[in-house]
């Protein structure tokens, strides 16, 4: 750990401060960001013990006694300083079969807003892949092989997509994983875009029990 004095300014984000340190004090500081507007999901770090998207987190909101303790995202290998290796995170999306299976000749599908599963599929698809939920998950911390909330949220999203040609493949891929969730809901409490991965995991558990996407 290294301590720095940084100048305060109105509406400063945590990412602004990390960037200030890199520009003025530590030119080789390793960290990651791209959009700075909450779209790309690349800037997540641990801020005073909690996983956050740093480009949308105001420093004055997150600070305790005028200080910020910033660490790399939990539950992932560190590449350098504040940059983590996201490969294990996205490998788990693949293990959860987190991709859409279309049909060979599929018409442009109009899905009614009130169609079953439409709300669940639409909500889950907004995931920006930031890894905040993954860092917040104590089950991932205890069981590193657990797929984690984002990958399971992705499987739940595909399962609810009315255009999905092979929904059972998603259930088969996560059958031994959803049951590992202890239901603490740290993922949903921390998701910066307001998704509910825990709700999706509960839905997967129901689907596994009752044999449909309920
Ligand atoms: S579910 Fe939320 S916290 Fe998890 S990766 Fe997606 S956007 Fe980030
Ligand atoms: S830099 Fe893109 S979400 Fe923060």
Image (cartoon, grey):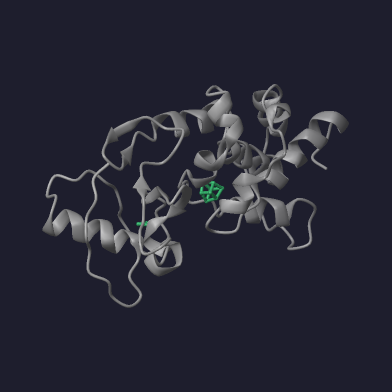
* Extreme-front residue of the structure: 65
Residue occupying the point 35% across, 66% down: 13
Taking 198 as reference, is 130 left or right? left
Q: Where is residue 124 in the image (x, y as percent from the top left)?
A: 62, 50
Residue occupying the point 76% across, 40% down: 202
Image quarter of the N terminus: top left
Q: In this view, does 142 lie above or below 73?
A: above
Q: Where is residue 26 in the image (x, y as percent from the top left)?
A: 14, 50
Q: Where is residue 166 in the image (x, y as percent from the top left)?
A: 68, 32
* Res 56 quadrant in image: bottom left
Q: Can residue 74 be seen in this view?
A: yes
* Extreme-bottom residue of the structure: 10
* Res 200 quadrant in image: top right
Q: In this view, does 191 lie above or below 37?
A: above
Residue occupying the point 67% across, 41% down: 156
Residue occupying the point 36% across, 51% down: 69
Q: Is residue 36 above or below residue 84?
A: below
Q: Is residue 162 visible?
A: no
**Foreground residue, 192 or 150?**
192
Looking at the rendered structure, the number of numbered marks drawn on it comes to: 0
Image quarter of the C terminus: top right
Q: Where is residue 164 in the image (x, y as percent from the top left)?
A: 67, 40
């Amino acid at each position: 750990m290294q301590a720095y004095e940084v100048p305060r300014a109105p509406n400063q984000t945590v990412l602004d401060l990390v960037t200030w340190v890199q520009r003025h004090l530590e030119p080789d500081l390793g960290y990651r960001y791209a959009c700075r507007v909450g779209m790309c999901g690349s800037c997540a770090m641990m801020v005073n013990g909690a996983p956050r998207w740093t480009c949308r987190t105001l420093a004055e909101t997150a600070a305790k006694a005028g200080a910020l303790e910033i660490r790399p995202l939990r539950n992932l290998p560190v590449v350098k300083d504040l940059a983590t290796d996201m490969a294990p995170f996205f490998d788990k999306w693949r293990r959860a079969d987190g991709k859409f299976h279309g049909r060979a000749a599929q018409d442009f599908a109009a899905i009614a807003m009130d169609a079953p599963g439409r709300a669940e599929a639409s909500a889950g698809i907004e995931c920006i892949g930031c890894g905040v939920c993954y860092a917040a998950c104590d089950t991932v911390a205890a069981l590193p092989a657990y797929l984690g909330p984002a990958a399971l949220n992705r499987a739940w999203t595909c399962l609810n997509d009315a255009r999905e040609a092979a929904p059972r493949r998603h259930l088969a891929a996560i059958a031994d994983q959803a049951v590992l969730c202890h239901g603490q809901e740290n993922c949903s409490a921390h998701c910066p875009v307001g998704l509910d991965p825990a709700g999706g995991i509960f839905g997967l558990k129901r689907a596994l029990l009752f044999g449909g996407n309920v």
